[in-house]
Image: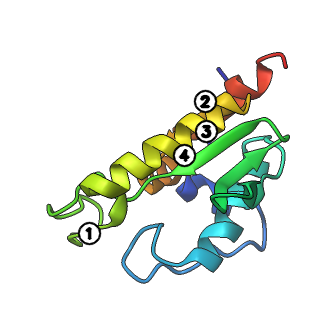
């Protein structure tokens, strides 16, 4: 597996690149800066630049959070710490992904992504921050069509 590059390491690898300021101490709170940072981290990890919010189902108006090479879908989940303090920032997130109906709706969407022939990966902002998802994306991109 290729080595991973974390958010902390990214700043030293890209001269002149400033990491976006995060209002609560970590990713997942500011969509604009999250998108810039994710794209930069993909490039630093030698991954192709992903497409953001790609529509894949006209009937349901579903979008894939990030799509790599038209075949690897990356869905970013809300905090797994629903109702408990996040270990990174102390925030107590809720979110639809952690509630009953939101969870069931996500399962339906994920099954539709998989049956459309895409490789589906799920991650959290914490895994993006640490860089642990990037070797997984690289491995998924190696899978033949």
- The spot of residue 63 in percent (x, y) is 66, 58
- Indicate which disc, 1 or 2, sits on the residue closer to the N terminus: 1
Question: In the displayed structure, does residue 142 sit left or right of residue 59?
Answer: right
The residue drawn where x is 24% and y is 72% is: 91
Query: In the rendered picture of this protein, how many numbered marks are placed on residues?
Result: 4
Secondary structure of residue under mark 4: helix
Q: Is residue 99 above or below residue 115?
A: below
Q: Is residue 143 above or below residue 36?
A: above
Image quarter of residue 13: bottom right
Q: Which residue is mark 1?
A: 93
Secondary structure of residue under mark 1: loop
Question: In the displayed structure, does residue 136 sit left or right of residue 94?
Answer: right
**What whole-number distance in Å separates the C-alpha atoms at marks 4 and 3?**
5 Å
- Indicate which disc, 4 or 1, sits on the residue closer to the N terminus: 1
- The spot of residue 43 in percent (x, y) is 79, 50
Q: Which residue is mark 2?
A: 136
Tell me if label 4 and label 1 are in contact, CB under 8 Å.
no
Q: Which residue is mark 4?
A: 109
């Amino acid at each position: 597996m290729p080595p991973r590059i974390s958010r902390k390491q990214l700043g030293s690898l890209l001269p002149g690149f400033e990491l976006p300021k995060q209002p609560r101490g970590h990713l997942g709170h500011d969509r604009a800066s999250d998108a810039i940072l994710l794209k930069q981290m993909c490039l630093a990890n030698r991954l192709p630049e992903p497409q953001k919010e790609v529509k894949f189902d006209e009937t349901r108006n579903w979008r894939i959070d990030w799509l790599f090479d038209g075949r690897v879908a990356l869905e970013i989940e809300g905090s797994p710490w629903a109702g408990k303090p996040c270990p990174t920032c102390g925030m107590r997130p809720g979110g639809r992904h952690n509630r009953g109906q939101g969870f069931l709706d996500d399962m339906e969407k994920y099954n539709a992504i998989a049956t459309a022939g895409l490789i589906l990966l799920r991650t959290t902002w914490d895994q993006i921050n640490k860089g642990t998802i990037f070797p997984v994306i690289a491995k998924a991109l190696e899978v033949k069509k």
